[in-house]
Image (cartoon, helix red, strand yellow):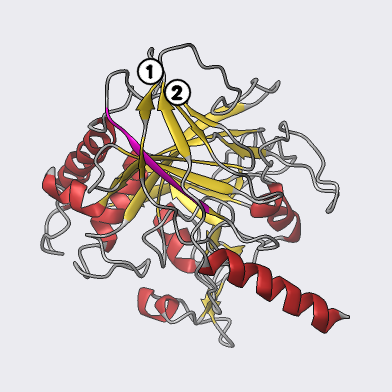
Amino acid sequence: MAVLWAALLMMVCTFVNGLRPAAPTCIVRPTGGLVVAWGEHPRQLHEIQVFADAAGAPVAAQATPTSPAIFQHALPGRQYWVRFRVHALGAVSKAGNWSEPSHLVECAPQGGRQEGAGGEHGRRDRGAFSLSVVRQSEYSNEIDYLGNHDSADMRGSANFLTGTATTNANRSIVNVSFYNSTFTRYCVELLPAQLPFKTRSHNSSFFADYLSCNWVPPVTPAAPTCHCQVWADRSIAGDDIGTDACHVLNHPRSNCTWDIDMVHNCSCPCDQAAMMASEAFTGMMPCLMFGKQQGTWYSHPQAAECQAHQPLGSVHPSTGRVCTWKQAPEMRLVHGWQLLRLGFNYSFPDNLPDAEKQAIVEQNTRVMQAAFDEAPLKKQAPC
C-alpha cells in the first residue's frame, strides 16, 4: 500500500510539474486594482504573477488556494499582464514543486464595480505585530517563500548582499547569480514570543533565537530545513563564539573559523527549550557587519506558519501546533539586474575601511528601496 501511495503522489507531482495550466482571466477595476480568476485545482495553492511589461519580469505576486485573487495596489489606467502556476498536491514546502506557468494574458478594463474578498491581509489579531522583510531566493530564480527560510529588513538584506556578493560577482553564497536573482518583499504578521528566558538577541518578548536555514547538509531546496544558529551567523550577530558555545567537530577545545564553518565542520549546540521556541516563533538576530549593526535578520519556522484561511493562534488540525506567523497575500518583486541598473555596488576591495563599507551599505539600501518603489503599483504602505 505504501508503494502505491508513493507512486500516486509521484504521478500527481509529475502532472503538476509537467503540464501548463490554462491561462487565467484578469480585469482592471476603474479605481485601480486587479481581479484575477482561474479554474481552481482543488486543495492546491496557486501563485499569480503580475507583469507591468509583457516582455519583462513580474513586479508582484500572490499565493492563494482560491479564485479570484485581488491585487489592491494596481494603478488605474495602466496595462498589466498576469500568469499563474500551481503547487504540487502533497508537496510539503512552497520552495519548490510548482507547475510550469500558464501563458501570459493581458488584463482588460472593467466598467463596473468589482467586489472580491481576496488580497486583504485580514483583521489584526490581538497582540500581533507586523514586519516588512526581504528575501533573496536560494537555488532558484523563482519566489521561494518564507517557510523554513531566513529573511531580513531592507538594510539587513542590503548588508548581506553587499558582503556576500563581493567574494563572487557571478554566483553568490545562495547558489544563484546576482544578476538573475529574485528579491521578494513580504509583509508578515506575527504573534510575540513572550518567552520566559533570555534569547541570544535579548529580545525574548517578541522573538525567539534565530535559526540558520538551508545551510547544514544535506540541503534540499524543495524541502528546506532550519538548524541551531551556526558559527558564521553567531559571529555576524556578535554572539559568543568561544569554544563553550562553538567548536570544531570532535575537537571541543578548538575554535572555529570562517574557513572551517564554510565546510560545515563546526558544532554550535542549542539549548533544547530555546530550540523548541525557535521552531514555534519567528527568530531574530542583529546583523553586525563592517563595524556596526546593519539591520536585522529573521527566521521563519514552517511548522508555525498560518495557512491562508487561518487566523494567528490557530491550531493545525494535523499537527496540533499553534500557528504564530502569517504572510500577507501580496508580494513585491525586484531582480538583481534592476538593482545593478540603479547603482547597487557589490564590488569593492576587502581592505576598504569600515566607514566606507558602511556608506556603501547605506547606498545599496537606498537602491533596493528605489527598486521596489519604481514598480508601476501604488506605493506599499508600511506593514
Query: Is residue 303 highlighted in magenta?
Result: no
Residue 294 can be seen in this image: no
Q: Residue at x 22, y 48 (%)?
A: 55
User: Is 80 inside the magenta-drawn segment?
Assistant: yes
Q: Which residue is mark 1?
A: 32
Work out whether residue 377 or residue 278 is closer to the camera in this orientation and state it: 377
What residue would you read off at disc 2?
Answer: 72
Q: Residue at x 29, y 36 (%)?
A: 372
Is the residue 66 above or below the residue 123 in the image? Answer: below
Can you tell which mark lies on residue 354? none
Q: Label 1 amino acid? A: Gly
- Residue 14 x/y as whole percent: 59, 72
Relative side of 19 to 61, left or right: right
Instruction: Please report whichever mark, 2 or 1, sits nearer to the chain's N-terminal start.
Output: 1
Q: Which residues make up the magenta segment?
A: 79-85
Gap in angstroms between the C-alphas marked 2 and 1: 7 Å
Name the spot of residue 39 as percent of width and height, x first: 59, 44
